[in-house]
């Protein structure tokens, strides 16, 4: 066996003489469609409530809200655009400086919106000071919400990964794989060595940093190794078809998101059936979106419903990484079960 495959499961430590430089940390990220939609909705709702205090009637409230929206919407979009463009630069700054700069940008965005109304002649006496502080206040609230969202992502990812390791790399899977390897050692030693190398790569991938993302290409390679292991176990009962689009391989996914879906297809499609089942993994590039499908036949029927932990973990981690841009659907129809994911490229 190639010992590099085994030793590679251990991560290199930084030199003890000089500590590794800390990686840049971005306390909030405005470069997501979901963030843009929520920010605009938050600002509009806040302004709608404020306008109620100064309105004498419904029509007066609508007129005031339309006037204020004409200033707030361009300012909000300008703030989001500036925060997104300066994303890498902000990541290299201390956290306190990032907060201060974001709030200052909010104040400037407020002045920008007020200036638009003044320039268009809709305001006789522009409220410059009120616009400055209103923009700063709304910006601070928005940054606080984004920071809470970013902080909430790490424990959720960690909990999902721990649950993934407990359910995916479970003892009976390890024992079955080792038993398959033992059975092949004397008859087909080369195949046994390849199987153990695949198992080594599977564990190395599972124990990677849970906060990092991987490409679809890496996930596909892992799924291929996993299915190669199960092919030894099930033989002709496991029929695998690949339909892959190279253009979609650059899409980013949370680690270990495809392998649990493939394992579900094996456990619920192939394992309960004496004649086996067919599994198809397909990818497609549609514009700026990568579509990923894992499909399997269910010859033995749906059987008892499981807890759905794997599907929930996959769906939650996909939402954490891509927010509203990540889509997840699953369903059973006419003896065929399919999981479909969409992620941005």
Image (cartoon, grey):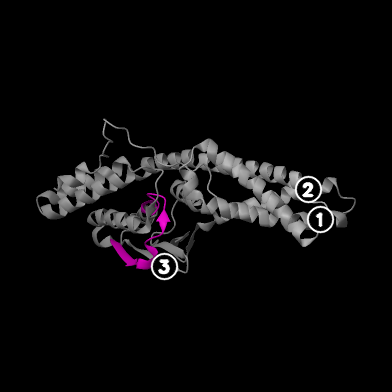
Which one is nearer the viewer's eye here, 344 or 225? 344
The label on residue 127 is 2
Task: Using the numbered discs, state the Cα–Cα distance from disc 1 to disc 2 in whole angstroms.
Answer: 9 Å
Pick out the residue farthest to the top. Answer: 17
In the picture provided, is 235 more to the left or to the right than 108? Answer: left
Q: Is residue 109 above or below residue 155?
A: below
**For residue 228: magenta?**
no
Kindly indicate the quadrant of the structure image that contains residue 66.
Answer: bottom right
Q: Is residue 119 visible?
A: yes
Task: Name the quadrant of the C terminus.
Answer: bottom left
Residue shown at the point (44%, 64%) measured from the top left = 291
| Residue to which mark 3 is pinned | 284
Q: Are marks 1 and 2 in contact (CB under 8 Å)?
A: yes
Task: Using the numbered discs, state the Cα–Cα distance from disc 3 to disc 2 in whole angstroms.
Answer: 52 Å
1 or 3: tag closer to the N-terminus? 1
Q: Is residue 173 above or below residue 68?
A: above
Task: Using the numbered discs, state the Cα–Cα distance from disc 1 to disc 3 in whole angstroms.
Answer: 52 Å
Pick out the residue farthest to the right. Answer: 56
Kindly indicate the quadrant of the structure image that contains residue 169.
Answer: top left
Numbered range of the magenta stretch = 238-260
3 or 2: tag closer to the N-terminus? 2
**For residue 242: magenta?**
yes
């Amino acid at each position: 066996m190639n010992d590099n495959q085994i030793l590679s499961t251990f991560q290199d430590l930084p030199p003890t003489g000089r500590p590794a430089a800390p990686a840049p940390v971005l306390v909030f990220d405005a470069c997501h469609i979901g963030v843009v939609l929520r920010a605009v909705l938050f600002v509009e709702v806040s302004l709608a409530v404020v306008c109620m205090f100064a309105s004498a009637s419904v029509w007066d409230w609508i007129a005031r809200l339309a006037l204020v929206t004409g200033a707030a919407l361009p300012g909000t979009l300008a703030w989001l655009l500036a925060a997104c463009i300066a994303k890498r630069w902000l990541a290299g700054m201390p956290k306190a400086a990032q907060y201060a700069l974001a709030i200052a940008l909010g104040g400037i965005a407020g002045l920008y919106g007020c200036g638009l109304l003044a320039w268009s002649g809709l305001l006789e006496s522009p409220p410059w000071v009120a616009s400055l502080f209103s923009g700063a206040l709304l910006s601070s609230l928005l940054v606080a919400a984004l920071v809470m969202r970013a902080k909430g992502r790490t424990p959720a990812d960690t909990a999902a990964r721990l649950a993934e390791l407990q359910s995916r790399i479970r003892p009976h899977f390890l024992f079955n794989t080792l038993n398959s390897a033992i059975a092949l050692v004397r008859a087909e030693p080369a195949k046994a060595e390849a199987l153990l190398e695949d198992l080594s790569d599977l564990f190395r991938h599972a124990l990677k940093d849970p906060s990092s993302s991987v490409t679809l290409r890496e996930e596909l390679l892992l799924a291929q190794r996993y299915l190669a292991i199960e092919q030894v176990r099930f033989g002709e009962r496991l029929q695998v078809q690949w339909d892959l689009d190279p253009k979609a391989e650059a899409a980013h996914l949370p680690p270990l998101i495809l392998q649990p879906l493939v394992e579900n297809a094996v456990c619920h499609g192939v394992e309960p059936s004496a004649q086996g089942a067919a599994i198809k993994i397909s990818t497609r590039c549609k514009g700026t979106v990568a579509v990923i499908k894992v499909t399997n036949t269910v010859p033995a029927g749906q059987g008892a419903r499981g807890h759905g932990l794997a599907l929930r973990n996959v769906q939650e981690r996909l939402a954490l990484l891509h927010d509203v841009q990540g889509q997840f659907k699953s369903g059973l129809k006419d003896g065929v079960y399919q999981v479909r994911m969409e992620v941005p490229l």
